[in-house]
Image: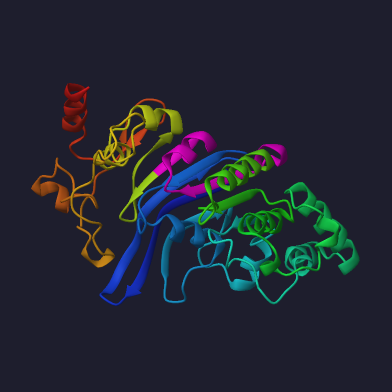
Amino acid sequence: MPLLEVDNLRIGLQTQGGPAEAVRGIGFTLERGETMGIVGESGCGKSITVQSLMGLLPSNAKVTGSIRFEGKELVGLDEREMCDIRGDRIGMIFQEPMTALNPVHTIVRQVGEPLRLHRGLSSADARKEVLALLERVGIPDAASRLDAYPHQFSGGQRQRIGIAMALACGPDLLIADEPTTALDVTIQKQILDLIKGLVAERGMALILISHDLGVIAQSVSKVLVMYGGSIVESGPTATVFAERAHPYTQGLFAARPALGAPRGARLATIRGSVPELVDLPAGCPFAGRCSFTVDACHTTRPPAMQMRHAHEVRCIRLDEVIAATAVQA
């Protein structure tokens, strides 16, 4: 049995423009110890997808479909039962280290909270565990800083503390939602290396959200490419990145800065702009921005087309896209 099974997940929200489907019938599985990345532009549905796994959606969200964790259905689960899973079996590292911690509580209290709630540890025992966790994630002089407050740490140290909190109960699944946001490049690498090391050390499954293709390439074994609340391409990371077949995936790669490009050279762009959720076409969400768009793209939801090595692409004009790509190569 997979650790996590998501099937036909749909998330509806009430927006200023009216009701909108933020996630449009996505599905995937994750095995124990497996690592998976989700990549795509802002607003494509990455974060709201993982928030649904944690039961952290807005109160007006309407969720249908299935999310099964260790065989247990999470959709429709009451808050009390969800609290037994959240922070215990599923841990999450949030994307903004400057605001993810409560400014009025000490570090030992915040990191120790899941240990007290889920493991029933006393304050003294939780304190010992917190010290070990902070030392493991690389907080210098951790013993003397247990009673410090978040503002007394740097951004990188706060993110390390957030990682310690997510790992406190030894979860089976770790979710990292853009964990290097607002950190400088050197600190980003340190945080990513720490997450990768801890996941391997503890045998956890990992879902890593990022807009950085390089981070995804180096960190996970399989990847989902999302656009407009849909998965447009998925499969083993190396295969998807080497044989990118969906026009959106190709556009993301074309927009990357190229090493050795002349100074001042313009980056390739994807034409148009990301539509509002209420304005997404009924068919392929990328219809209109895609150079291969035909009338049917606006009305026909593309099925998953199987390629080699469990590589799936959702495009009704896949043959034409592949043929054009071969000519360009």
Relative height, residue 129 to residue 149 (above, below): above
Q: How is the image coloured?
A: rainbow
User: Is 78 or 111 nearer to us in this picture?
Assistant: 111
Determine which quarter of the picture holds residue 229.
bottom left
As displayed, is residue 314 above or below residue 229?
above
Q: Quadrant of the N terminus?
A: top right
Number of numbered tags placed on the structure image: 0
Q: Is residue 159 magenta?
A: no
Q: Nearer the viewer, residue 62 or 107?
A: 107
The magenta stretch spans which residues?
199-224
Report the residue at 30% width, 31% height from top: 261
Instruction: Name the quadrant of the C terminus.
Output: top left
Vertical arrangement, residue 12 with respect to residue 282, above or below: below
Residue 70 in sight in this render: no
Pick the front one: 186 or 325: 186
Left or right for 138, reference 294: right
At horizontal 51% and vertical 41% (from top left) the residue drawn is 36
* Residue 212 located within the stretch drawn in magenta: yes
Q: Which residue is at 42% across, 35% downward?
A: 235
Give the residue furthest to the right. 124
x, y percentage for residue 125?
89, 62
The percent position of residue 103, horizontal first and vertical second, equals: 66, 74
Residue at screen point 75% across, 53% down: 139
Residue 114: x, y in percent? 74, 64
Q: Position of residue 130 (x, y in %)?
A: 80, 58
Quarter of the image where one finds residue 306: top left
User: Does residue 256 appear in the picture of this structure?
Assistant: yes
- Depth check, front residue: 143 or 210: 143
Q: Is residue 302 left or right of residue 213?
A: left
Judged left or right of residue 83, residue 234 is: left
Residue at the left extreme? 295
